Image (cartoon, grey):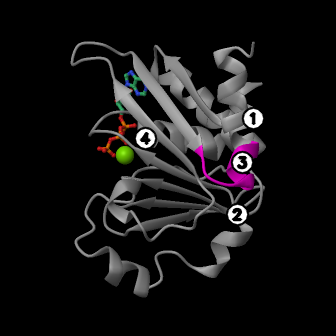
Amino acid sequence: MASHAADARSQHTGVLSSGSTDATRAIGRRLGTAAQPGSLLALSGPLGAGKTQVAKGVAEGLGVTTVVNSPTFVLMNEHPGRLRLFHIDAYRLDDPEEAIAAGLIDDRQAAGVTVVEWADRLDGYLPADRLEMELVPDGEASERRTLLWRATGPNAAHLSEALEA
Ligand SMILES: Nc1ncnc2c1ncn2[C@@H]1O[C@H](COP(=O)(O)OP(=O)(O)OP(=O)(O)O)[C@@H](O)[C@H]1O
Ligand SMILES: [Mg+2]
């Protein structure tokens, strides 16, 4: 009989527990190292969950040397690396449709790697093949986070495999 772990692998879903900022970054780094052209990481989870830490890790894995912070005044930051990193924060997005029309998701992202924070606010507008990852904090006083993910296409499945390895 197949184990639950084998089931998760075949469905490209998974779960990891992080006990520190560094551990969350390291998970991002694994994603950045495995990322291919067109890789899309759709992050969700509450304020302070660690989405930007994952993005920083992805940047490290891509060899990005510029500083990755949440794009506060713009919706998207770009960073050169092994592949170009597009870092989107949809938190302040009022109108997803308008943002998409204005080029928030553009053709160049197919050749680079895109990380979206508050991806749930772009629900229905993101490319179909993506790694959806939710960060669930354990509680106010805890540094523990549960990271749950699901791949929705072949490019994302490759990222999922990198986390399972
Ligand atoms: N296990 C952990 N993983 C990630 N961050 C952690 C962890 N434990 C503590 N932290 C701290 O929690 C904070 C996470 O902040 P971060 O900006 O990454 O969150 P965010 O999800 O991007 O929030 P926002 O929605 O405001 O963009 C950081 O100060 C980080 O040091
Ligand atoms: Mg953030």
**Counting residues from the N terminus, which is met first, the one under dot 1 or under dot 4?**
4
For badge 2, the amino acid type reads Gly
Disc 2 versus disc 3: nearer the observer: 2
Q: State yes or no: residue 157 in magenta.
A: yes
Label 4, label 3: how many angstroms apart (C-alpha)? 17 Å
Q: Which residue is mark 2?
A: 38
Q: Which residue is mark 4?
A: 51
Q: Could you tell me residue 43's position as x and y percent?
A: 45, 46
> Based on the displayed image, in which of its 4 quarters is residue 34 positioned?
top right
For badge 1, the amino acid type reads Glu
Q: Does any atom of ligand 1 lie closer than 8 Å to the CB of label 4?
A: yes
**Counting residues from the N terminus, which is met first, the one under dot 2 or under dot 3?**
2
Q: Which mark is residue 62?
A: 3
Q: Which residue is mark 1?
A: 161
Q: What residue do we see at 60% from left, 36% from top? A: 28
Disc 4 crowd rating (10 Å Cα; few below 14, some 14-19, many 20+) is: many
